[in-house]
Every structure is written in C-alpha cells, then in structure tokens.
Image (spheres, rainbow, N blue to C red):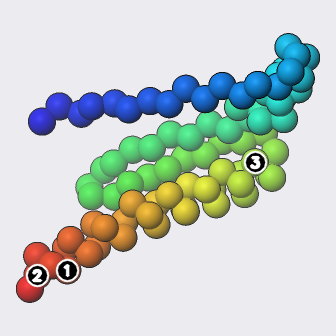
Amino acid sequence: MPLTWQEVLHRLCRGTEQHAHLCLLQLQPDKVKREMTVSNGKLSVHFEVVEARFLQASYSAFVDVLILATKPIEEFRKGMAL
C-alpha cells in the first residue's frame, strides 16, 4: 500500500508583517537538523544544532513523539503473542 502524506498549513494572524517575522525569528526553524535512518531493525536519529538549548528541546520533543508511536506497537505485539 503506498504511503499517503498528510500535511498541515497553520497560519497565525500576527497583525503586521514585522510581527510575523519576529515570530519566525523566535521559532528559528534553521537551527535544528534531524536525519533518521533504519538499519538492521534499528532506528537511528542524528541531530545537528547551533545551540545546546535547541538540542534539548528537539530531543525531548522527539522522545515524546517516539513514546506515543511505540506504545501502540508494543500493545499490538503483546496481543499477537497471546
């Protein structure tokens, strides 16, 4: 079955062009790079950041999502073992 991509476009009303650019600067999307690969049944994630605080936030968010993703997999696997 082919993978179907989902997407979200979120637009925030920030009043002026200047306010919107200030928000963009605060979010700093160019400060974190993440590459994921799978090899021999193992997921590897490589983070590159310009400041340590971005690594902490990015890694923490990644682990939170990973936990949410793995719980149903583990439950399904337990059910299959019965």
Q: Is residue 21 above or below residue 35?
A: above
Q: Nearer the viewer, mark 3 or mark 1?
A: 1
Dot label at residue 81? 2
Q: Is residue 43 visible?
A: yes
In the structure shown, which secondary structural element does the residue marked by tag 3 occupy? helix
Q: Provide residue 66's location: percent of width, then percent of height.
A: 46, 60
Q: Name the amino acid type tagged 3.
A: Phe
The reply to whether the C-beta atoms of the residues labelled 3 and 2 are less than 8 Å apart is no
- Which one is in front, 41 or 75? 75
Determine the CA span between mark 3 and mark 1. Answer: 36 Å
The reply to whether the C-beta atoms of the residues labelled 2 and 1 are less than 8 Å apart is yes
Residue tagged 3: 54
Query: With 6 as the anchor, is 57 left or right in this view?
Result: right
Q: Nearer the viewer, mark 3 or mark 2?
A: 2
Q: Is residue 48 above or below residue 65?
A: above
Q: Residue furthest bottom?
A: 82
Quadrant of residue 19 within the rendered picture:
top right
Q: Provide residue 22's location: percent of width, then percent of height.
A: 88, 26
The reply to whether the C-beta atoms of the residues labelled 3 and 1 are less than 8 Å apart is no
Quadrant of residue 41 within the rendered picture:
bottom left
In the image, what residue occupies the spot 24% across and 33% down? 3
Determine the CA span between mark 2 and mark 1. Answer: 5 Å
In the image, what residue occupies the spot 50% across and 58% down? 65
Residue tagged 1: 78
Determine the CA span between mark 3 and mark 2. Answer: 40 Å
Q: Provide residue 24's location: percent of width, then percent of height.
A: 79, 27
Query: With 74 as the anchor, is 16 left or right in this view?
Result: right
